[in-house]
Every structure is written in structure tokens, then in C-alpha cells.
Amino acid sequence: MKTDVAWMKDYLKKHSIKPSTIRIKMLKYLMENRIHPTVDEIYHALLKDIPTLSKTSVYNTLDIFLKNGIVSLVTIEEKETRYDIDTSLHGHFKCESCGEVYDFQVNAENLKEEGIEDFDVLDKKIYYSGICEKCKKK
Ligand SMILES: [Zn+2]
Ligand SMILES: [Zn+2]
């Protein structure tokens, strides 16, 4: 994954987002940390780099990213909103033991939906939960 500044600027512009410093740094963070971070996690990770950062600007930036389709929301638990830079259809597995959220691939062509043929689908989410491999070995 390319995360050089020129590429990121271009990527933001392509999605009609003006590439400000905060936006570029947030994009870089999201691309390099595929952990489905929460606002808090993003805020604390970037604070070292941008001491003037506020939580509001993290929220606002994520909101713009969301509206322009470069991040998607991961809401496995209602109280906990996470952000995902991967907007393609993939599944999420949340480990009940360590709390980590894993990505897994799904074969979209094999997905068979029945009974909603005439519905407009705006969003698809695939969530699993359980115990991850790492925790099982403990
Ligand atoms: Zn685990
Ligand atoms: Zn994901």
C-alpha cells in the first residue's frame, strides 16, 4: 500500500476532499493501522504528531471521509464506533476475549440473498464474533 504524501493528496482529491495536513495524516494512519480504530484511538495516536489536534477535528475529518466514501463504519457494538479504510465488502470477526476486530474475505458472488430482491440495499455488513486463534491457544 502506497502511503506517500503525493499519492494520498491525489487520493483525497479524487474523492473530492481538500487535502489538508490533518486529513493526510489521518488517511496515512488509517492505511497503516488496519485495526479498525475508534475516534479515541485515532486521536491519541495522532496527538504526538499534531499537538493542536482536537477530538472534534478527528470527528469532523472522519465525517468527511465517510461522506466521500473512503472509510466505512464498523459498528459491532452500539457504544463503540470504529472506522475502516477498507470499504470493499468484507467480513469482521470480533474476538470476545481480546476485543480485536479481524478482517476476513467473503466471496460476494456466493452470497445468496433471498426475499429482498426488490429492496434497495444501501449497506452490507457481515459480522462474526467468537474467540480468535491467538486467544484459543492461550
Ligand atoms: Zn482474541
Ligand atoms: Zn475491516
Image: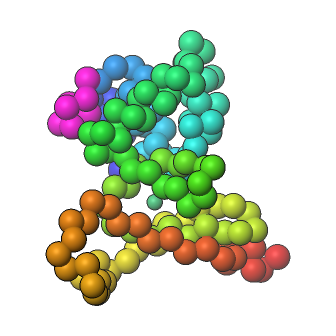
Taking the magenta stretch, the answer to whether it contains residue 136 is no
Looking at this view, is 56 or 95 the one in front? 56
Q: How many marks?
A: 0
User: For the view shown, which residue lies furthest in the right direction?
Assistant: 138
At x 62%, y 39%, the residue is 41
Give the magenta part as a residue range: 11-18
Q: Is residue 94 above or below residue 8?
A: below
Q: Is residue 17 above or below residue 34?
A: above
Q: Is residue 55 above or below residue 67?
A: above
At x 44%, y 51%, the residue is 73
Quadrant occupied by the C terminus: bottom right
Query: In this rendering, does residue 45 appear at all?
Result: no
At x 69%, y 61%, the residue is 99
The quadrant holding residue 77 is bottom right
From the top left corner, tell me how far across and down residue 128 is, in percent: 55, 75
From the top left corner, tell me how far across and down residue 88 is, in percent: 31, 61
The quadrant holding residue 15 is top left
Q: How is the image coloured?
A: rainbow
From the top left corner, tell me how far across and down residue 69 is, in percent: 28, 45
At x 32%, y 61%, the residue is 123
Left or right? Give the position of 23 relative to 112.
Answer: right
Query: In this rendering, does residue 40 appear at all?
Result: yes
User: For the view shown, which residue lies furthest in the top direction?
Assistant: 52
From the top left corner, tell me how far across and down residue 8 is, in percent: 30, 34
Left or right? Give the position of 136 relative to 62.
Answer: right
